[in-house]
Amino acid sequence: MTPTEYLRPATIPDALKALKRGTALAGGTTLAPRARHYALLVDLQALGLDTLTAEAGQVRLGAMVRLQTLAEAEQGVPAALAEATRLEAGLNLRNTSSLAGSLIGCTGRSPLSTALLALHAQVRLEPGPVQWSLDELLDRRLKELQGRLVTEIAFQTPGLMAYAGVARSPADRPVVCVAVARLEGRAPAFGVALGGFGPRPVLVSGAEHALAAGEIDGAAQAIEAACASADDAWASAEYRRKAAAALLRRLAGEAVR
Ligand SMILES: Cc1cc2nc3c(=O)[nH]c(=O)nc-3n(C[C@H](O)[C@H](O)[C@H](O)COP(=O)(O)OP(=O)(O)OC[C@H]3O[C@@H](n4cnc5c(N)ncnc54)[C@H](O)[C@@H]3O)c2cc1C
């Protein structure tokens, strides 16, 4: 087998050139164990994509921001997002994993992706730049990322945000989790995301519209419906329906006020 080639470009144009035939290497937590299966790994750590800014009501997170940086951030980062980031992984993994790598590699059991979805986060990619919603990135990540580089994830500072989940132990990944954000200047004015199962967390637009109308019962029904086929080895759909509705009611009580 040909040994894996390794490049560490210092500019975005150089990185894009290398990505035409190579694979992006961020924190390497998922790639490193399989490194020998890749012909060329393009290390992103010299690109300066590790800044976090919160200005004029917008939070901008570089693709290479480490999860621990986000978990510790205070200025402008909602406490519920920092908490979801702490629940994403243990300290060692948070110190290594990048934000973009974690979103691209996530499953439905990702508290961080669930929280960012509720914030209706936007993703910036090169070449372009082009902008995708995080919802689109989660749909397109498997087939349409070859040759592209995620550079930034951004969201408007929410009026209010809350996250809650149920897991087998306090530090475990959730079997069901819900994030609710009150989004300023957007219709509907709420973001509601559901996670804990399946290949990715999902936005529950029925719950978003119901909350915007002040209908917490309607929002709970919408989130129950989104759990209809959520059976797996970790929990039954019936359990998730009840737990998700209870979490939604609890969070909505805080967010709708
Ligand atoms: C022991 C262990 C257990 C885990 N358990 C879970 C789990 O239960 N649920 C879950 O959701 N995840 C789980 N993960 C996945 C893990 O948390 C994330 O996938 C990981 O944090 C990825 O971050 P990274 O920076 O190391 O990315 P890398 O491993 O470097 O990259 C991940 C992927 O993203 C691509 N990529 C990275 N950055 C960019 C970029 N800027 N632009 C374009 N492409 C990019 C890479 O090419 C690669 O395909 C687990 C990981 C480990 C090691």
Image: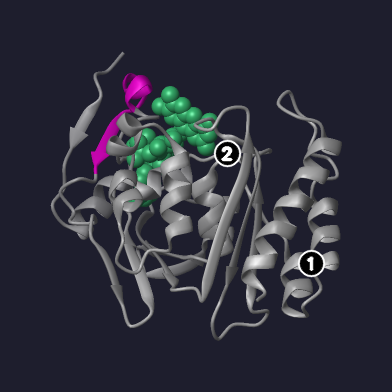
Please state if 116 lies on the left or on the right of 51 as rendered. Answer: right
In this figure, which residue is indicated by the disc labeled 2? 107
The stretch of residues the image draws in magenta is 32-43
| Residue 122 x/y as whole percent | 47, 67
Residue 43 in view? yes
- Secondary element under disc 1, as helix, strand or loop, is helix
Residue beneath the point at 34% across and 67% down: 60
Q: Position of residue 12 (x, y in %)?
A: 22, 58
Q: Is residue 107 above or below residue 53?
A: above
Which residue corresponds to the image point at 25% horizontal and 24% vertical from the top-left?
A: 4
* Badge 1 or badge 2: first in the primary sequence: 2
Q: Residue at x 78, y 52 (%)?
A: 245
Taking 125 as reference, is 110 above or below it? above
Residue 27 in picture, x, y percent from top left: 30, 37
Q: Which mark is residue 42?
A: none
Q: Amino acid at mark 1?
A: Gly
Q: Is residue 37 rendered to the left or right of residue 108?
A: left
Quadrant position of residue 23 = top left
**What residue does disc 1 label?**
206
Q: Nearer the viewer, residue 57 or 28?
A: 57
Q: Quadrant of ligand 1?
A: top left
Residue 23 visible in image = no
Quadrant occupied by the N terminus: top left
At 78% from the left and 80% from the top, the residue drawn is 213
Image quadrant for the C terminus?
Answer: bottom right
The quarter of the picture where residue 203 lies is bottom right
